[in-house]
Image: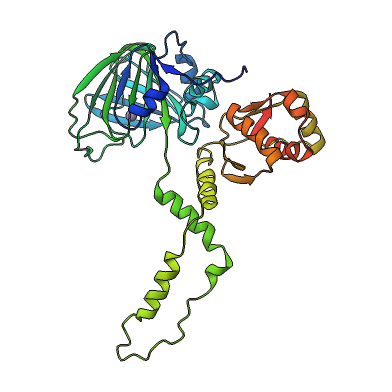
Amino acid sequence: MTNLPQPLTHLGRLPVAQFMRRTWQRRPLLVRGALPALPPPVDRATLFALARRAEVQSRLVTATDGRWQLKHGPLARLPSPARPGWTVLVQGLEAWVPAAAELLARFRFIADARLDDLMASYASDGGGVGPHVDSYDVFLIQVQGRRRWRIGRQRDLAEVPGLPLKILADFRPTEEWVLEPGDLLYLPPNVAHEGTAVGGDCITCSVGFRAPTLGDLAERWLDALTVQPGWRANLTDPGLPATRRPAALPPTLIDQARSKLCALRPTLTDTRELLLAALSEPKGDAVFTAQRLPASKRVALIRTHGVRLDPRTRLMYSGRLFGINGEVHRATAGTAAVLRALADRRMLEAEQCRTLSPAVLGLLGEWLQAGWLGPR
Ligand SMILES: [Mn+2]
């Protein structure tokens, strides 16, 4: 596999810096010819073959006379492309198709902390998943055939009850475009939208994003706190006054509980660690293949070939703190620079690996053993 391409500097003629300042998370934007001359990263046959595999997340959506049906993969049989009104969606394509990993890498002008995955959908004429909203940002890239997108910024996001997929009950589109190969539509979260294939053999790629909820982080933080010994100590109440209302909660107890709870403040380091652990958590379906090699073989392999992160590995950093697939590591000053290079470029060349300290080689060897990275 060749090295990952550099992130885009422009979407069509729009500088990405300007896009991030003015558009990201704020408003939808259609960019004609955003990715001109983009070869489709995946073809129909490959998508269909992936949809058959158990380890790949896929869905089949059919709409027959207004009746929506959803089937989760593995999908042994798909309808004929000649039959109108169906679509198959394959999630996490970057793990299986190098060209998809390359397309996703073009969008790394946005931090890995926010990037989720690349999904591809194939649709026969009129196929789509119906009008809906998503809670995440998305870039919709037309790679083959044509698709009509209708969007609306409606407040009423009520769904049709009892359906296997989320369909807006009262979709009121206000804008409409037909996208051709190379065109891109950006949607911020919660914009109602519907994409329908115009003619057959329509392939659209979605660059999906994610963001942690405050609840995710709070839960993680409390989990980390409650294993600390201080948390097992009971609250105390010297000077508790005698009471004539035994059922009433003593104010001293309330005050003490409140002051203790208010004293809980995550430090900056706590926050960085929490975010790194949460955001580097691999997708639920990621299964890494452990390598069984003696330590000396691992080191030799790394020094001879360099290393490349598995496409499903999530490695990100903040200073000398690193989050990899849900684990947090603290690196020394000397080690941090090379690990940051690995995280940003997702690979290290053999020449870079030859001069690494035994400590870094040992760490990379462990990651190799876990299947999180492999030789280049
Ligand atoms: Mn959507």
- Does residue 317 lie above or below 144 as drawn? below
Residue at image coords 76%, 41%: 359
Q: Quadrant where the N terminus lies?
A: top right
Give me the residue at 40% from left, 51% from top: 215
Query: Relative to the observer, which residue lies in front, 311 or 333?
Result: 333
Q: Position of residue 313 (x, y in %)?
A: 58, 34
**Quadrant of the rendered image holding ligand 1:** top left
The x and y percentages for residue 172 are 17, 28
> What is the quadrant of the C terminus in the image?
top right
Q: Is residue 269 visible?
A: yes
Q: Is 261 located above or below residue 107 in the figure?
A: below
Left or right of residue 179, residue 270 in this image: right
Looking at this view, is 122 or 71 the one in front?
Answer: 122
Image coords of residue 167 (percent x, y): 25, 33
Residue in view at x 52 percent, y 63 percent: 226
Identify the residue at the far top of this view.
37
Q: Quadrant of residue 372?
A: top right
Residue 207, horizontal then vertical, whole percent? 42, 26
Relative to 272, 13 lies left or right:
left
